[in-house]
Image (spheres, rainbow, N blue to C red):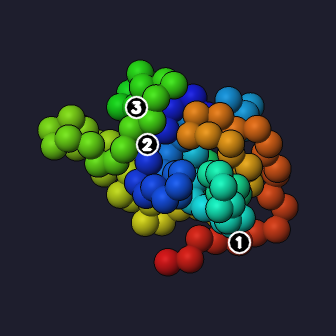
Amino acid sequence: MKAVAIFDWQDGPREGFARLETGHGAWWYFRTLATRFDPDDIDQCLYAFSEVPADDALVLEDEFGAAEGRPIIWPGDPGEVSEGATEVVERVAADAPPPSLVGRVVSSTGCCELWQVYTSFGFPR
């Protein structure tokens, strides 16, 4: 994960956008799919990733791409996020396409394993 905008945090990111270097596309909406509680360390999480449409990905890259290597907590300071990025974030988070990748993430800036999804499922609303 090269850049992230995080909407929800509980012992690690729970939902947001990430730029992945996967060969499948650059920007992805992610949400926690499953968590394994660890009382002595950070919980282990699996995330479902939905690819962001190309036009929306360009807006996210312009807004968050320069934050490479450091997470951004959404919504950030008022006035720091453009109206266009706010619109994309709200629309995609409310109606994300079905996930096409599942990943195990070890930190907010690193993804260590990704799996292609072959069975269609959607995010609960």
Give the quadrant of residue 124: bottom right
Picture layout, residue 89 above or below residue 23? below
**Image position of 83 (left or right of 20):** left
**Number of numbered callouts drawn:** 3
> Residue at label 2?
5
Q: How far separated are the C-alphas under marks 1 and 2?
A: 23 Å
The residue depicted at 59 percent of the width and 71 percent of the height is: 123
The residue depicted at 80 percent of the width and 42 percent of the height is: 113
User: Type of residue at label 2?
Assistant: Ala
> Residue at label 1?
121
Residue extending furthest front?
40
Q: Residue 125, how many percent across, how many down? A: 49, 78
Secondary structure at badge 2 equals: strand
Asked whether disc 1 touches disc 2, contact meaning CB atoms under 8 Å apart, the reply is no
In the picture, the disc for residue 74 is none
Picture layout, residue 99 above or below residue 24? below
Which residue occupies the foreground of this view, 118 or 71?
A: 71
